[in-house]
């Protein structure tokens, strides 16, 4: 029985090749879009997650927290200071403590200029952010202590301002002030917040305080990066830092903290949640094309029922049961949908991998899109074929035989 139904479905499809192709094309586009959107969502999630994980699960960022009633001012607040960073170095369980003061300026070399983000810090910051030196050297303790004009530039700063020469030992003007380049950072790309890390310039914290910061006397910082021993418990370390800073800042028990601690583990978990929501959202948007494809199948099957009315009447007159008639049209709709699903799946995977190759990113492949595609194709085929098949089954054989 199944073999006969399959054979008749194939005959019907091949008898109207163009119409069958256009109907199948709707499903192909829909499934292909769903697969590509799922792959895109997973790729974005993986890229962001990898960048957070690369920083280590034992990294904490301590930032100033402005009270809600306070009017915002430009520049950093004074709740987190260099004195806090130096004091934290004495706290048990903390391996690295790096104070960070940020600024921005225009960097110039001859006729070339580039907007850069300035990071005033210590050599320990290289360890917290997993920065690596591509050429030259990093900042040393003498640079930090004396506040020298030695700087380490990002990869993009080098390519934009020194495209045809080695920048090591050259002079670069930042904010119309001369600095000496002693090193170049390895390429890192954009941060999770979208900032271009390769446009960074690292210089001694004291240098930034003296030359780019009007809050220098306050010793204010943008944040403190802290790495603790991997054997330490994250929650215990956070509690220890919180108690320590509350004590230093003389915060009363009933008052809120004037700082906030961010940990990478929470970021990673939030990124996973965002990635999942993003994948579902993209898949929902792509599913619209599947709905259009399903409508195309319904339309084709209704036309097919109308065209084959006399054939249905003859079959019923010869004793064909209603479930046979219904199964024939339902199977044809499912077959169209499944063929479109398979082709759409192959096309979606191929285009996703091709896009990953061109953009030089790893596009994950999992069984999830495969299962999803076949499930969606089957459901769409069944739903699209039920009404036309039911209509064919309910045709009166006498009226059907009279149909011209």
Image (cartoon, helix red, strand yellow):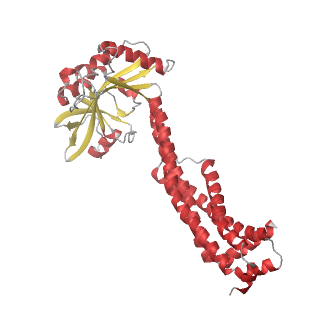
Residue 237 to residue 169: above or below: above
- Using the image as rendered, state which of residue 46 and residue 302 is in the foreground: 302
- Residue 169 shown left or right of residue 37 in the figure: left
Report x, y in % for residue 31. 57, 59
- Using the image as rendered, state which of residue 49 and residue 147 is in the foreground: 49
Q: Is residue 42 visible?
A: yes
**Quarter of the figure that contains the N terminus:** bottom right
Q: Is residue 148 visible?
A: no
Identity of the residue drawn at 72% across and 72% down: 394
- Residue 120 shown left or right of residue 47 in the figure: left
Residue 71 to residue 2: above or below: above
**Quarter of the figure that contains the C terminus:** bottom right
Report x, y in % for residue 298. 61, 69
The image shows a total of numbered marks equal to 0
Residue 221 to residue 117: above or below: above
> Which picture quadrant has residue 23?
bottom right
Report x, y in % for residue 188. 40, 39
> Which picture quadrant has residue 305?
bottom right
Identity of the residue drawn at 83% across and 79% down: 318
Report x, y in % for residue 276. 51, 43
- Using the image as rendered, state which of residue 290 and residue 228 is in the foreground: 290
């Amino acid at each position: 029985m199944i073999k006969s139904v399959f054979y008749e479905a194939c005959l019907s499809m091949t008898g109207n090749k163009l119409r069958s192709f256009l109907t199948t094309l709707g499903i192909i586009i829909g499934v292909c879009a769903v697969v590509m959107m799922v792959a895109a969502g997973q790729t974005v999630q993986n890229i962001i997650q990898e960048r957070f994980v690369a920083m280590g699960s034992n990294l904490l960022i301590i930032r100033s927290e402005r009270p809600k009633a306070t009017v915002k001012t430009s520049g950093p607040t004074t709740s987190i200071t260099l004195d806090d960073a130096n004091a934290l170095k004495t706290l048990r369980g903390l391996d690295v403590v790096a104070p960070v003061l940020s600024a921005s300026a225009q960097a110039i070399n001859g006729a070339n200029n580039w907007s850069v983000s300035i990071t005033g810090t210590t050599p320990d910051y290289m360890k917290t952010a997993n920065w690596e030196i591509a050429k030259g050297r990093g900042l040393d303790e003498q640079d930090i202590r004396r506040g020298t004009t030695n700087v380490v530039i990002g990869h993009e700063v080098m390519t934009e301002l020194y495209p045809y020469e080695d920048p090591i030992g050259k002079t670069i003007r930042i904010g119309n002030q001369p600095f000496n380049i002693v090193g170049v950072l390895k390429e890192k790309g954009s941060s999770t917040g979208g900032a271009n890390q390769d446009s960074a310039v690292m210089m001694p914290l004291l240098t930034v305080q003296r030359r780019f910061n009007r809050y220098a006397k306050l010793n204010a910082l943008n944040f403190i990066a802290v790495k603790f021993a991997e054997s330490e418990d994250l929650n215990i370390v956070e509690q220890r830092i919180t108690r320590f800073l509350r004590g230093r800042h003389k915060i009363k028990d009933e008052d809120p903290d004037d700082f906030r601690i961010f940990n990478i583990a929470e970021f990673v978990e939030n990124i996973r949640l965002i990635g999942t929501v993003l994948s579902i959202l993209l898949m929902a948007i792509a599913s619209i094309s599947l709905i259009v494809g399903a409508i195309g199948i319904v339309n084709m099957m209704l036309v097919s029922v109308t065209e084959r009315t006399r054939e249905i009447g003859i079959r019923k007159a010869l004793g064909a049961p209603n479930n046979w008639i219904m199964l024939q049209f339902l199977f044809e709709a499912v077959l169209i949908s499944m063929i479109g699903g398979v082709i759409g799946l192959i096309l979606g995977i191929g285009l996703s991998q091709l896009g990953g190759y061109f953009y030089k990113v790893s596009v994950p492949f999992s069984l999830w899109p495969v299962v999803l595609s076949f499930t969606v194709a089957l459901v769409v085929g069944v739903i699209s074929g039920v009404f036309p098949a039911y209509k064919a089954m309910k045709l009166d054989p006498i009226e059907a035989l009279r149909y011209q």
